[in-house]
Amino acid sequence: MSHRCRWPGCARIVGDDLWGCKAHWRLLPSDLRAWIGRAYRQGMDSDTHPNASYRRAHRAALGWIGEHR
Ligand SMILES: [Zn+2]
């Protein structure tokens, strides 16, 4: 199972256990990575429907990306 990197505009394919490709994952601040990592493990057990805490963490990441790239 795999999906596209969740960084907007990135087309790299990554495994389901990852949020995005290594290059983009490393760009996120460590507190966001910790948040996403935690929410991801809890939220991705139903494969295609991430739970609310994962969606919140992902929205926070998108907000950070919008401000910093
Ligand atoms: Zn990427």
Image: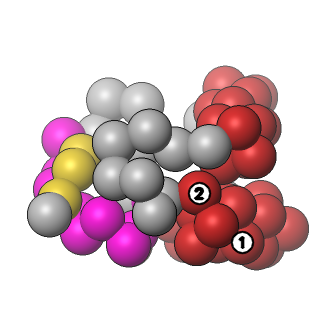
Question: Label 1 crowding class (10 Å Cα cut-off): few <14, some 14-19, many 20+?
Answer: some
Would you say residue 16 sits in the magenta stretch?
yes
Q: Residue at x 48, y 59 (%)?
A: 44
For the residues marked 2 and 1, what is the alpha-carbon distance in whole angstroms? Answer: 9 Å
Left or right, residue 46 beside residue 12: right
- Image: magenta residue range: 11-19
Q: Quadrant of residue 35?
A: bottom right
Q: Residue 50, position in %: x, y?
A: 52, 44
Of the two numbered discs 2 and 1 on the same chain, state the one appearing first in sequence.
1
Q: Up-down: is 45 above or below 22?
A: above
Q: Quadrant of residue 64?
A: top right
The image quarter containing residue 34 is: bottom right
Q: Residue at x 40, y 69 (%)?
A: 18
Q: Is mark 2 within 8 Å of ligand 1?
A: no
Q: How is the image coloured?
A: secondary structure
* Residue visible at 32% across and 29% down in the picture: 9
At 58% across and 72% down in the image, what residue appears? 41
Dot 2 corresponds to which residue?
43
Q: What residue would you read off at disc 1?
A: 38
